[in-house]
Amino acid sequence: MMRRRAFLGSMVALSLPATVRGQAPADGREPPFLRGRLQAAALPGIADRLPKKPRVIDLAAMGRRPGAYGGEVRVLVGSQRDTRLMTINGYSRLVGYDEKLDLHPDILESFTAENDRVFTFKLREGHRWSNGDALTSEDFRYAWEDVMLNEDLRRGGLPRELLAAGEPPVFEVVDAYTVRYTWTAPNPDFLPKLAAPQPLVIAMPSRYLRQFHEKYQDEFRLAALIKQYRAKHWRDLHTKMSRSYRPENPDLPTLDPWRNTTAPPAEQFVFERNPFFHRVDENGLQLPYIDRVLLNVSSSEIIPAKAGAGESDLQFSGIDFTDYAFLKDSESRYPVKVSLWTKTQGALLALLPNLNSVDDVWRKLFQDVRIRRALSVAIDRTEINKAVFYGLATESADAILPESPLFEPRYRTAWSQHDPDLANRLLDEAGLSDRDDDGYRLLPDGRTAQIIVETAGENTLETDVLELVTDHWRAVGLSLFIKTSQRDIFRNRAMAGQIMVSMWSGLDNGIPTADMNPGMLAPTADEQLQWPVWGIHYLSNGQKGTAPDLPEAVMLVDLLEQWKRTTDMAERTAVWRKMLDLYSEQVFSIGIVNESRQPVLRSAHLRNMPETGLYGFDPTCYLGVYKPDTFWLEREA
């Protein structure tokens, strides 16, 4: 039977004031921040800035208060690359998740999905980019035909998310506000990737970008632009000027709540409200409430100190649990509040034995499940939780969290108990029964069993935890040596198979639903440090790396492909369960704790920001699903 899902925009608009329905609003509905431009006729009134059917955010239904316009919020960032935090947290998407991880139309007015093969998107008539240009089907056609199918701009071919069974979709412009993508096989990744932290871009501001495209621009003018922006080729120019995830081009039109007004390099990036943003509250006030967000660039090492000294109004990046006591103390000195959110990673820290190690002996050992299980049960997670996390985290394998509908307690407890006797027995059975005079086990080639654990050296938590693991592994005859390096070097060494064991975070998405891709459980990316060579083989469609030869890893890839082929939710859930069982029992990642806490600092005047929440990159987009455009500043009289 065909499975057809239809997702419509909010129907609340039918009962809202006239302003929401596109009629002339009262003056009080205009943001004072825009008054000068409105008086100078540099902007149309709110009735012409909003779509005919804006997205209505019913704050009262969410247990929050409708707010008021005005104010600015300061955020400390470690570098200009962190401008991407505005794209992630602004969370304006064609479709997006809510706090319950249900998908809804956002930029889109509605969409239908037929068997995950045919996707029809209807735009909001009257929706505009931040510069006032209309958002229409032409912006989707430009992104498809002139960018994605352009061999100069997409030398690596189409993104994987636009391929189903290796084939691209048929793209159609149905009318000025409707487009359709049709695949011959299911493409369940399509909608989640549109809602992702780094979303799949299938619509671009075509009117603005044509000036940088050889198809539309005069060759002499294009040459002048290439020289002006110091690009080597028109493709580099177009890529530079169209980059939306890291919004460094102030002239690039956006659909986000705030638009960057500052060109790099700079010590402060000023993001101002997008006067054409498509969301309103139940009273017809156009979101965002806050006028400006200031990203102040600082050294990463002193962000916690600056935040604790009252130099930030909203801080979540650049601070960690180790800073919590200091930040909490700042409440007595500055008008700030500090709360603890729950991190969504499967493990805050995980040990990742490299199954693709260039060391033949260690590679064979790490591919033996008995070794991986022994390394895990040798660890005393209770001691680590109490000593490092004050008992506030949860001792667990690298596993999904209870907030996921797929959660089962067995995933958390699989081979995560502290059992040195079991660890010793497993190591003996795996052939490491011989020891030297100091009690350390010997490898088959006579070397001492010294495990070098490498980290990117970005967090003192890593070394604090590893010092305890050193004692735990010594108790079962294994020597641990800690090595730190810079992130780029660390990544390159891991992908080259030169790292024996990495310490990194665990599963990126600890709160998945069955509709989300389970690829994080299989070798699918080179950034998966337990099997980077297998991962890049999958990522490159077999052009790089090598295919997995471990039966359980092959099975995970096969199950992933099975998930992609089915459109039945029960079958997808069953595949997820099989993959979670296999991943847990095989201990491909050795988690330490999860449900760890992330401090979040905010101005005491900031309203509508939850006291607690789920904090992670994917799928919550840090603060994104909590809609920062609805946060507002309540000033004392």
Image: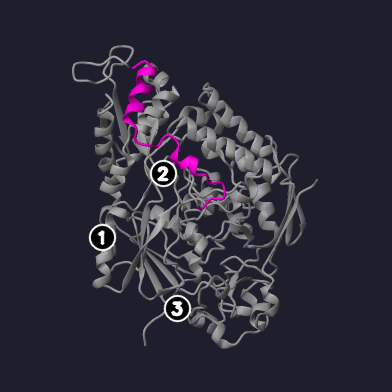
Q: Amino acid at mark 2?
A: Ala
Considering depth in this image, is 21 or 214 the residue closer to the camera? 21
Q: Amino acid at mark 3?
A: Gly
Tell me the SS state at disc 3.
loop
Binning the other alpha carbons within 10 Å of mark 1 as few (below 14), some (14 to 19) or many (20 upward) gives few
Residue 239 seen: yes
Kindly give the residue lying farthest to the right in the view shown. 1
Q: Is residue 359 left or right of residue 58?
A: left
Task: Of the two numbered discs 1 and 2 on the same chain, state the one appearing first in sequence.
Answer: 1
Q: Are marks 3 and 2 in contact (CB under 8 Å)?
A: no
Tell me the SS state at disc 2.
loop
Instruction: Name the image quarter holding residue 183.
Output: top right
Task: Of the two numbered discs 3 and 2 on the same chain, state the one appearing first in sequence.
Answer: 3
Residue 118 drawn at (x, y percent): 75, 48
Q: Amino acid at mark 1?
A: Ala
Question: Which label sits in the foreground, 1 or 3?
Answer: 1
- Image quarter where the N terminus lies is top right
Residue position for label 1: 325
Residue position for label 3: 70
Residue position for label 2: 347
Binning the other alpha carbons within 10 Å of mark 2 as few (below 14), some (14 to 19) or many (20 upward) gives many
